[in-house]
Image (cartoon, helix red, strand yellow):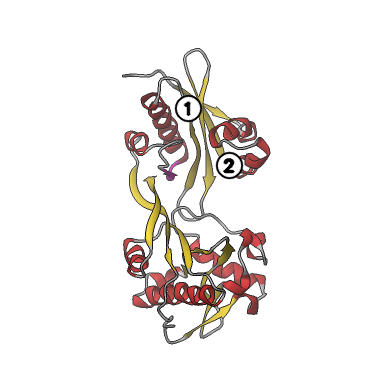
Amino acid sequence: MMFDVTVRPAAPADLPPLLAALYGAPEEDVAWMADTLSAAWTAHAPGGEVLGAVGLRPSPANGAELLGGALAHPQGRDHEDAVGAALARTAHLEGGRVYAFADGHLFSAAALRAAGYREAAAYRLLAGPTPQAAPQVPPGFVLRPLTDVPDLAARLDALATYEDRLGHHAVSPAAAGDGAGSYDPALSLIALDASGRAAGICRAAPEEGYARIDAPGVRPDLRHGGPVGGDLRAALLLGVCALARARGFGDVSVEGWGDTPAELAADLALGLEVEIENPIYVAP
């Protein structure tokens, strides 16, 4: 079935009411999204009814992420997919390299494929019993609790190791401070190379009955420079798991954005299982 959808440019500052409707959150909770957008569009029915909205949130190495999507519609999924495809197609044509999470609601995989996007990575939440293996730190590196490295510049360098991964964005100084994102610096590790330069990071936060861990970030030159990158990633994750065990956490969750198949395989080999997976689609 064909649906008549018109996409028009919009001012990012006008999007919070639509973002609130799309994400099911109070407008004040999504206002920050509009502040990050470099461009935006709205989708309309022939009579002018707003059917959805999309904005571009710039990414350091991957163009921009699409925020927004299609509003729920009485005509159902086919109509919503037509709206999502129209928004995604316009965002790509006007914005260049872009990517979007196929969450099945705001943008479905079918809508993104119809707009010419292809699956390239995923967001995953893994969970399971806290791995027991001891960390094996590669020669030339040292792992230190984040509490031992209060220097914000060093922490920012470590957090910047994520910036080239799909699903990640530029880090801000606020993200490096103690307590940011509810992460516990005493439950988190930073990797330093022989020169003292940040080589990677793995942060964790205590939750009710388990430790919430971000998949480790490793510097791109190490990640792409042979096995040491994978070895350092494993050491960071297992090192944080050891800290979690010492705190009495028998279970962990591990969240990752844009991890490679090899990294996923390594995490599964630790006994973790995928609980949530949202594919990430790109339009180069």
User: x, y (%) of residue 80?
Assistant: 42, 27
Q: Residues within 10 Å of mark 2 (few under 14, many from 20)?
A: many
**Mark 1, mark 2: which one is toward the viewer?**
1
**Is 209 above or below relative to 100?**
below
Q: Amino acid at mark 2?
A: Leu
Residue hosting label 2:
37
Does the magenta portion include 3?
no
- What secondary structure characterizes most of the magenta part? strand
**Is 30 above or below relative to 167?**
above
Tell whether 182 sits left or right of 221: right
**Is 198 above or below relative to 72?**
below
Q: At 61% across and 64% down in the image, what residue appears? A: 183
* Picture quadrant where residue 5 is located: top left
Judged from the image, the secondary structure of the residue bearing numbered disc 2 is loop
Residue hosting label 1:
72
Q: Residues within 10 Å of mark 1 (few under 14, many from 20)?
A: some
**For this rendering, which residue is in front, 171 or 27?**
27
**For this rendering, which residue is in front, 222 or 20?**
20
Specify the segment rendered in magenta: 96-101
**Is 12 above or below relative to 185?**
above
